[in-house]
Image (spheres, grey):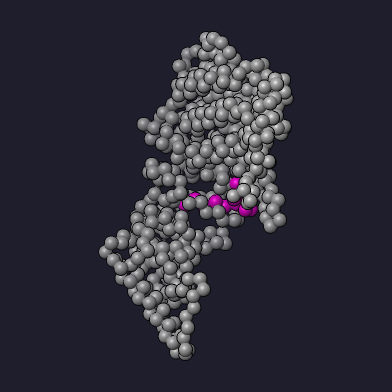
Amino acid sequence: INQPINQHYHSSPFLKSTAIMETVYMNQGTSVDKGENARLSSFVGAIAIADMVKTTLGPKGMDKILQKISEHDQSIQVTNDGATILQNVFLDNAAAKVLVNIAKVQDQEVGDGTTSVAVLCGELLREAEQLVAKRIHPQTIAAGWRLARDVGRKALEAHAVDQSADAEQFRKDLIQIAQTTLSSKLLTHEKEHFASLAVDAVLRLGGSGDINLIQVLKIKGGQLHRSFLVKDGFLLQKSIGVGQPKRMEKAKILVANTPMDTDKIKIYGSRVRVDSLQKVADIEKAEKAKMRTKCDKILAHGCNVFINRQLIYNLPESIFAERGIMAIEHADFDGVERLAKVTGGEVTSTFDHPELVTLGECDVIEEIMIGEEKVIRFSGCKSGEACTIVLRGSSSHILDEAERSLHDALSILIATVKEPRAICGGGCSEIHMAQAIDREADATPGKKAIAMASFAKALRQLPSIIADNGGYDSAELVSQLRAAHASCTDSPCGSTKGLDMEHGAIADMKEMGIRESFKSKLQVLLSASEAAEMILRVDDIIKCAPRSRDQM
């Protein structure tokens, strides 16, 4: 659909002349989609993207194979993570790119619900397409959606429960939320084990909420259930220098980010002219003397372990070996930052004032083997905030997907620690919000009530899609679920009934331990409705060709 002028503009001579004037005064290569053409193009693009990822929704969702078609890179990924799928799909539709952006924001803000937000936005636009066909104005639909969103938010807040005051019960809630998140991932068969690992890692952060302090090491070999959390220390996937001690007790650690090679003239085109080989030798001798002086300044700090972000060349490595110092080179920037946190030290770049530098402390540093990989373990560290989770798996594809799954669980747990309210999963909250919106729509006059009813219908599509993906009769299950919620009048928070995808029946989500984060579900509701409203309000799509060089 890429017609420059919509057909209905030809029905009026004035509109026809206006459209012709637009095309005359626009630069060559500029096209305009107007009115119904623009709106239909937006609807079709966004709904197509939502339909592509909706088969991955829920515990019985399917995976996608993402294959690159570059001449030099034909790698593949096997995943059901909505954000990963959408980020790797090439799109040429503006509305489809909006869905990709809201999935990215959902992944950054909460970590989970990336598929749900795209699917809900697509279902809202599907309903809007039918309403526009009935000659209901987009502004009226948007106004009704805003009313429905406010009602849904209030119903969701009433449905949420905060048990953070009881530490034991809150930990139980966190484990249930992590298990619910992992139920739709590769780790579903080991969800109890990985949920426990994730909760332990997040609680070690002490409320800081910095996910970068949780390091995930992927080591091939073994099975997924052999993955573990390093509880009493930290791992660094680097090697110790040649000829240096492989074990150090009561370590005093200097963490640095400094060049440990000889000085080079780094000005392009510069040269050094000498008239004899003796002067070349003098230059090399001066360089070595300068490096020895730098090493002496480092040793003056009283450290017995030196960790540098950059490379350590042969001369300083041999100097450290002579003094019995353990040196670790090329620790990546994230590794250096985590080490500074976990050991209680500071990252330093200059060494003229040792009294101003704080050294890290650790009981034991030693080189160990995990599978066929050598790693360095730091035990008895001064600070226990940072930690390491070691993932084991049979292939790189499994390890990559396991890392993505674990990242989602860690992100949702960190968000739950900040916002401790939780809700029941399994489609329970969607039906609860939809029924609250339906009740409000019955008391709302005008066409806005029709838009509110369409919003409720879109919410009910989420449990329907989950049931479809499991191979069950979605119409039967959703109707039973609606009846169960409608018959619940004794609880102010509403029914806790939801979909039991193991048996294809309706069950109590609270008893089954299927819980979701309130923040995640709220973010899905707000982001999807706002994005759908923005797409709905579009009436023109203007595509402009870039300026040619002779116009600049």
Q: Is residue 351 above or below residue 413?
A: below
**Residue 412, visible in the rendered structure:** no
- When the figure is inspected, residue 304 is found, relative to residue 500, above or below; the finding is below
Query: Front-most of 4 and 199?
Result: 4
Give the quadrant of residue 305: bottom left
Count of numbered circles in the view: 0
The answer to whether any part of residue 419 appears in the image is yes
User: Residue at the location (61% across, 38% down)?
Assistant: 97
Of 512 and 497, which appears nearest the observer?
A: 497
Find residue 283 and report its horizontal and vertical position in percent: 43, 82
In the image, 179 versus 10, the foreground residue is: 10
Query: In the image, 312: left or right of 93?
Result: left
Q: Residue at x 56, y 45 (%)?
A: 404
Which image quarter: residue 500? top right
- State which quadrant residue 55 falls in: top right
The residue depicted at 67 percent of the width and 55 percent of the height is: 73
- Say if the magenta span includes residue 89: no
Task: Where is residue 144? Give x, y as percent.
Answer: 54, 18
Residue 398 lies in the magenta stretch? yes
Residue 288: percent from left, percent from top:
41, 79
Counting from the top left corner in percent of width and height, residue 505 is at 63, 24
Residue 512 vertical position relative to residue 253 in the rendered view, above or below: above
Q: Which portion, as a residue range, is magenta?
A: 388-401
* 338 left or right, relative to 92: left
Q: Quadrant of the N terminus?
A: top right
- Report the front residue among 149 and 241: 149
Which residue is drawn at the image coordinates 68% and 33% (left, top)?
Answer: 23
